[in-house]
Amino acid sequence: MTEAGKRRIAVGRISGLYGVRGWVRVYSYTEPREAIVGYSPWWVRVAGHWQEMQVAGGRRHGKGVIARLDGCTDRDEAAALVGSDIAIRRSQLPETVAGEYYWADLIGMAVVTLDGRELGVVKSLMETGANDVLVVEGERERLIPYLHPDVVTDVDLETGRIRVDWDPEF
């Protein structure tokens, strides 16, 4: 497995307890939110340390998601997990088609203009409804719409660079 495939991708966090048999409430970052239970194993950050845990079951419950992890059989064991981050390995995600990228792949990439001027690094992305927006941190923060090919002209995962048709003064 490549280093990129081993990289952990945040997919949610354990937000509370559900019942008395070790089930937990999960705040999912996935779309649809219940897709998180389809990824196993999870890497759960407990007390600052990542632990690999198998998903024994889970489903959508109301507006949220509930799940049970192998070895977590009662409320006290589940309570120790509340507040923990959930991640998966990058290699667990389905392959993308040409021209599609996971947000996690874009974070950390350098952003440069067509004439080679460095604007900064993708710090995060946000969804606006109309289109996604790159949050680029450089000498100042820039919000650049992810509009391909009008604004984002090229994404090169190999070199870690995103080329944009963007006025650096904007």
Image (cartoon, rainbow, N blue to C red):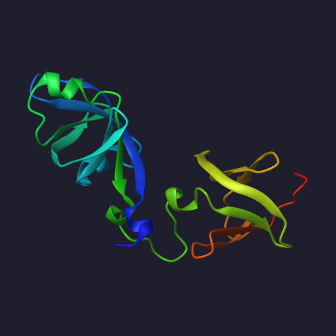
Residue 41 coordinates in the image, percent (x, y): 23, 53
Left or right, 163 with respect to 7, comes to right
The quarter of the image holding the N terminus is bottom left
Residue 128 coordinates in the image, percent (x, y): 62, 44
Q: Which corner quadrant of the image does residue 6 belong to?
A: bottom left
Who is closer to the viewer here, 141 or 170? 141
Residue 100 coordinates in the image, percent (x, y): 52, 69
Image position of 33 with respect to 165: above or below: above
Residue 133 visible in the snapshot:
no
Who is closer to the viewer here, 3 or 63? 3
User: Could you tell me which residue is drawn at 39 percent across and 67 percent down?
Assistant: 5
Image position of 123 with respect to 46: above or below: below
User: Could you tell me which residue is drawn at 77 percent across and 66 percent down?
Assistant: 112
Left or right, 47 with respect to 72, comes to right
Image position of 169 with respect to 66: above or below: below
User: Could you tell me which residue is drawn at 19 percent across and 42 percent down?
Assistant: 58
Image position of 150 with respect to 70: above or below: below
Left or right, 83 with respect to 120, comes to left
